[in-house]
Image (cartoon, helix red, strand yellow):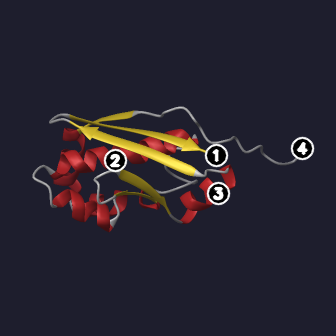
Amino acid sequence: MRGSAAIAPPSAEPSPQLIECARIQHSIERFGDRFLHRVFTDGEIEYSMSMKFPERHLAARFAGKEAVAKAFGTGIGKAMGWRNIDIQKKSSGEPFLVFSGPAEAFAAKRGVTSALITLSHTEHHAIAGVVLEG
């Protein structure tokens, strides 16, 4: 395709991302609400802060956002921002992704028809995996 960049298809391979919960706790202690509202949606903050160990839930969501960016092959920045990737929960507890703004447009451009996510955490680590289908 001369004169235009080829659009790579979405990744059908899992894109795991691991993060230390202490990293998120440190950012909360150092930057407070400024950090929280720069990275997480209001719903993610509300849910995580209602839990006994909010940093673990926030770390899992942080890892999830990084896994999405990794699956798209873009990173966080020009193509999509942190808050354009929203990790919500069904009543069953299953997490799901909601894209907005540039992330939603990028997903449509890439032909993403389904975005699957899994989250888990321990006392010290959080992990997320994302598969984009389309």
Q: Amino acid at mark 3?
A: Ala
Q: Which mark is residue 108?
A: 3
Q: Nearer the viewer, mark 1 or mark 4?
A: 1
- Secondary structure beneath disc 4? loop
Q: Label 1, on which residue? A: 134
Q: Label 4, on which residue? A: 2
Of pointers 1 and 4, the one earlier in the residue sequence: 4
Q: CA distance from mark 4 to mark 2?
A: 37 Å
Q: Amino acid at mark 4?
A: Arg
Q: Residue at x 31, y 67 (%)?
A: 42
Q: Amino acid at mark 2?
A: Phe
Of pointers 2 and 1, the one earlier in the residue sequence: 2
So how many labels did they put on this image?
A: 4
- Secondary structure beneath disc 1? loop
Q: Position of residue 14 (x, y in %)?
A: 49, 33
* Circle 2 crowding by C-alpha within 10 Å: few under 14, some 14–19, many from 20: many
Q: Label 2, on which residue? A: 62
Q: Is residue 94 left or right of residue 33?
A: right
Tag 3 near tag 4, CB within 8 Å: no
Of pointers 4 and 2, the one earlier in the residue sequence: 4
Front-lying residue, 119 or 54: 119
Q: Position of residue 27 (x, y in %)?
A: 23, 49
